[in-house]
């Protein structure tokens, strides 16, 4: 096992990010029984070299922790295609803007380890009947000092540091509202890929813009890994799984389902033969407006308000906005809602982590498949 790395003070961007990173670094790391935990790059690279010498393949699933069934679905897919799976757990400060509260991001190490151990037991049982079923071999849980060894990581738009920028893709949609987000994502993924050198990396379709950015980065920089995109994992009612859902609570979760309903309405318009932006996005906007109007008519103790950041109809490769969908190519429908903090709460109400005071950004997408 590699040792816990401390001394992260000079590698935090703000007071809140310092506290978050210092707390994570100082906590005792629970050691699982079925895989190793690595805190520095050289140790996990040593394991990777051993696996290469044995002709074993590595599937890599990068996460920020707070694992849910969507993450586990990625790992299961990686286990079907590789002998060994690496999972990273690292809350990357450079993808949080200066106005975003990095310290509030959920950190659930013990629960995450328990889920991964149970999943390894499941994979072990599968392996008894199939020699091709892989296992989780390692968790990579670095500190910011390990990930950003030169300068402290910066969340300033013009901040100093070594960054990977993928433009214009990173300036669209989520990038328009969060200008440093994809710079941070591309930078940390490039670092993680360089450290673990996986045969394949796995991402969920829910973060569709992220998948496009990563695929472009891998292509443009000749990164020797295959990017695998796995279908979005959803609750039975359609809500896309996300680590941030723990903040919703019952009231905001019910209203937050509008995100999926707007996309489904737009998809139905496309499947009915509509191809114009006005017709497809008009169906989505109608749902969003109707639900918001209803919520505004309720009392502060009953309602959950939101703001629609965007509803997009874009080219699947460039994310350029479309006026007409080329049915031979299809399109990407995506949206982002900002769920506002609850104005008033009721006694014993399920308000989620943070007691309903934490704003929650919900994103989702549906791929409009090509059709004859």
Image (cartoon, grey):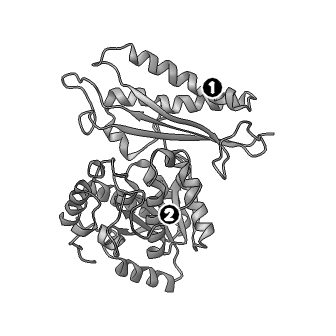
Q: Earlier in the sequence, mark 1 or mark 2?
A: 2
Residue 28 visible within the image: no
Quarter assignment of residue 295: top left
What numbered label is drawn on residue 341?
none
Numbered-mark total: 2
Helix or strand or loop: what does disc 1 sit on?
Answer: helix
Front one among 4 and 286: 286
Q: CA distance from mark 1 to mark 2?
A: 41 Å
Are there few (<14), some (14-19), or many (20+) residues within 10 Å of tag 2? many
Are there few (<14), some (14-19), or many (20+) residues within 10 Å of tag 1? some
Front one among 328 and 278: 278
Question: Given the current orientation, which residue lies at the most extreme front position?
Answer: 158
Position of residue 90 measured from the top left corner of the image (x, y, whole percent): 35, 62
**182 relative position to 313: left or right:** left
Residue positioned 65% across, 46% down in the render: 320
Front one among 137 and 274: 274
Vertical comparison of 311 with 21: above or below? above
Position of residue 250 measured from the top left corner of the image (x, y, whole percent): 33, 29
Position of residue 138 measured from the top left corner of the image (x, y, whole percent): 38, 70
Which part of the image, by quadrant, shows the N terminus? bottom left
Front one among 15 and 21: 15
**Residue underneath mark 1:** 282
Residue positioned 66% across, 28% down in the render: 268
Position of residue 213 measured from the top left corner of the image (x, y, whole percent): 56, 57
Vertical comparison of 354 with 29: above or below? above
Vertical comparison of 191 with 288: above or below? below
Vertical comparison of 191 with 73: above or below? below
**Residue underneath mark 2:** 79
Residue positioned 54% across, 82% down in the render: 55
Q: Nearer the viewer, mark 1 or mark 2?
A: 1
Residue 363 visible within the image: yes
């Amino acid at each position: 096992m590699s040792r816990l790395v401390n001394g992260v003070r000079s590698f935090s961007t703000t007071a809140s990010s310092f506290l978050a990173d210092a707390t994570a670094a100082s906590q005792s790391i629970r050691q699982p029984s079925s895989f190793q935990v690595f805190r520095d790059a050289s140790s996990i690279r040593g394991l990777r070299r051993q696996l290469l010498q044995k002709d074993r393949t590595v599937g890599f699933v990068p996460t920020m922790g707070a694992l849910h069934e969507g993450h586990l679905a990625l790992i299961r897919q990686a286990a079907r295609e590789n002998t060994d799976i690496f999972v990273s757990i690292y809350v990357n400060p450079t993808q949080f803007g200066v106005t975003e509260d990095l310290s509030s991001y959920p950190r659930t190490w013990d629960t995450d380890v328990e889920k991964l151990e149970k999943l390894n037991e499941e994979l072990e049982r599968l392996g008894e009947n199939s020699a091709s079923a892989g296992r989780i071999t390692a968790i990579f849980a670095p500190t910011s000092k390990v990930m950003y060894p030169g300068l402290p990581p910066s969340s300033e738009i013009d901040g100093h540091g070594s960054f990977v920028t993928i433009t214009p893709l990173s300036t669209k949609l989520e990038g328009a509202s969060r200008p440093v987000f994809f710079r941070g994502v591309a930078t940390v993924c490039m670092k993680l890929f360089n450290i673990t050198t996986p045969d394949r990396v796995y991402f969920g379709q829910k973060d569709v813009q992220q998948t496009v950015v990563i695929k472009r980065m891998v292509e443009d920089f000749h990164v020797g890994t295959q990017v695998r995109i796995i279908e979005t994992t959803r609750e039975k009612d359609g809500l896309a799984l996300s680590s941030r859902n723990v903040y919703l609570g019952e009231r905001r979760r019910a209203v937050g389902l509008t995100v999926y309903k707007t996309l489904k309405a737009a998809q139905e318009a496309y499947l009915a033969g509509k191809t114009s932006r006005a017709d497809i996005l008009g169906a989505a906007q109608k749902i969003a407006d109707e639900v918001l109007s209803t919520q505004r008519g309720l009392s502060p103790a009953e309602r959950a308000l939101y703001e629609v950041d965007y509803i997009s109809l874009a080219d699947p490769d460039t994310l350029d906005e479309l006026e007409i969908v080329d049915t031979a190519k299809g399109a990407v429908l995506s949206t982002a809602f900002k769920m506002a903090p609850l104005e008033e709460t009721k006694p014993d109400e399920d308000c989620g982590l943070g007691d309903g005071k934490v704003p929650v950004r919900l994103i989702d997408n549906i791929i409009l498949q090509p059709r004859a």
